[in-house]
Amino acid sequence: MSRLRSAAEAALDRRSFLAATGAVGVSAGIGLALRPDTHARTVAAAGPPGAAPAAPAAPGASPAAPPRVPVPGWFPTTLRTVATPRGSASGYRRLGPGPGWKRVIRTQLAAARSGRAERRTALASFVQLTDLHLTDVQHPVRTEYLRAQAAGAWRPQEALTVHGAISLVERVNALRGGPVTGADLGFVMTTGDNTDNNCKAELDWFLRTMSGGRITPDTGDPARYEGVQDSGLPLYWHPDAALRDADKQRGFPRLEGYLAAARRPVTSPGLRLPWYSTVGNHDDLPSGCFANGNGSGYLAEFAVGGRKLLSLPVGEARALEAVLRKGTDPRGGYFTDLLRRETRRMRRVTPDASRAPFTPREYVEAHLDPAYAGAGPAGHGYTRENADTGNLHYSFRISDGVLGISLDTTDKGGHFAGSIGRAQLDWLKRTLLAHRDDHVIVFSHHNSWTFDDGGGEKLVALLKRNRNVVAWINGHSHRNEILAHGGFWEISTASHVEFPQLARIVELTDNHDGTLSLFTTLIESATPHRTDYDDLSQTGLAALYRELSLNAPGARQNLAGPPEARNTELLLKKR
């Protein structure tokens, strides 16, 4: 078990970090190597044959070596500085470095006793990424035209999701341990919506971003862009053109060469830590809300075909938006009928088989592919049994005395809200009982307030009954929120597709006074806070990605959450 006395917390932005370490240049792929002493290992969970699998832990697995003591200035987190808007809130705003967010101590579940900082030892330390939404912006099934009804239905920054995610990988690679304990980071967990359109090309981009490799964030005709941003429709931002579109009227810049630059090949260094994957509704369902047809049906054919709808009358957009928001078209029948009616309004695009939807089995098999192994572990939590059964939940060993559980909360029937069936709840009960002497951390995509079948309340009740559960970590809402539930904390983290584009470090410590602490520390990507419009390099585009997300029309301005949901110490009783 990793143990270390507490040390000072500090942070360093990417440019200062590179300068301090003597690195030359700020091109993508630069970052310090981490040397975890052990990889997290999958552990067996109680259950009959056919239950979601978890391979046995390796016998005789040794505990992690003592972590390094943090060195002041080596932790590039939001404790020191945060990208902060400049200028009037009514216009297009630029970003620059601003003051960091202080750590808030929360005592709803246990009192904060003096002297704990000198006593505490580290039990676990890891990073959560969530809602990357790597997006094929030219995909035919996308519904950008709903922007006519809801401004936030299309994001001007979406062509740069891969660039932003790679910069986040760079940031994680630059971390030297937990900012509170200095413990080696054990792993990275993604909590779903890694892709946006349930598209094979996006899945490849995600896996290469995480495990390392060259990525061409482009589909269709390799010689030209075929999406909404060169359509001549003022509804969308046209960065290359002189068109006075709606976004330029709001202050968005004209950037000649942007679309070509956004589609150029980029390179990810891959995470230097083992990483695990949790599935989200956008990974499992076409458009994040339609039942997966196992690669067949009209929507699957339309996805790889040669037509794309770019605009829709406001009345039609209003009706479709209402149907999707209410979840009353789980199999996509209404949507399919609309597409068939609107053929004449469609633009011809280049067919591309890589835009095909992937099935749950194909999702798991891609994770098992050695080409995407990266720093491991094999399958990134999933096993061959997951592929064969279609059950996408599993457990894994985080460290001695700490167990991780990854749940599948997607509604297979078709809806963006969460769902959890009886079989998975029963498996979870058995797993928690089998590991009653461990501290347990549960991961899922959906949070407790975004289920459509009472599943959130059922999960909270089950986790509260099991005194070994210390945290439930999730995403989906794209907003930082932390809730106290009886004996455990629910930690929901903001997305990386919408401003402020965050991820989270979590450290679990024993305070040796009858309490535990969960430290949560938010991190940004490695890109500079200031954007240079003349810099269309991989790093420059990642910086632009953040600025565009700040200014996206219809974007919510409260996604950072309150201070008590950002950098925190969450106390709870040791069971």
Image (tube, helix red, strand yellow):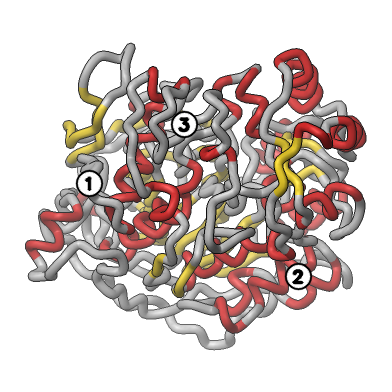
Q: CA–CA distance between discs 1 and 3?
A: 18 Å
Mark 3 vs 2, N-terminal side: 2
Q: What residue lies at 33% left-to-right and 22% top-to-bottom? A: 251
Residue kind at label 1, given as amino acid type? Asp
Q: Position of residue 436 (x, y in %)?
A: 64, 58
Evaluate whether residue 549 shows in this view.
yes
Residue lying at the far bottom in this picture: please name it.
Answer: 60
Compare residues 88 and 388 and report the one nearer the observer.
88
SS class of the residue under badge 3?
A: loop
Q: What residue lies at 76% left-to-right and 77% top-to-bottom? A: 384
Residue receiving disc 2: 53
Residue receiving disc 1: 534
**Which part of the image, by quadrant, shows the N terminus?**
bottom left
Around disc 1, counting alpha carbons within 10 Å, would you say few (fewer than 14), some (14 to 19), or many (20 or more)? Answer: few
Residue kind at label 3, given as amino acid type? Trp
Q: Position of residue 557 (x, y in %)?
A: 42, 21
Residue receiving disc 3: 237
Question: Does 68 sit left or right of 254 as displayed?
Answer: left
Q: Position of residue 377 (x, y in %)?
A: 54, 77
Q: Nearer the viewer, mark 3 or mark 2?
A: 3
Residue kind at label 2, given as amino acid type? Pro
SS class of the residue under badge 1?
A: loop
Eyeballing the image, is 239 above or below 121? above
Question: Does 332 sit left or right of 479 as displayed?
Answer: right
Evaluate whether residue 516 shows in this view.
no
Mark 2 vs 1, N-terminal side: 2
Q: CA–CA distance between discs 2 and 1?
A: 50 Å
Eyeballing the image, is 56 above or below 271? below
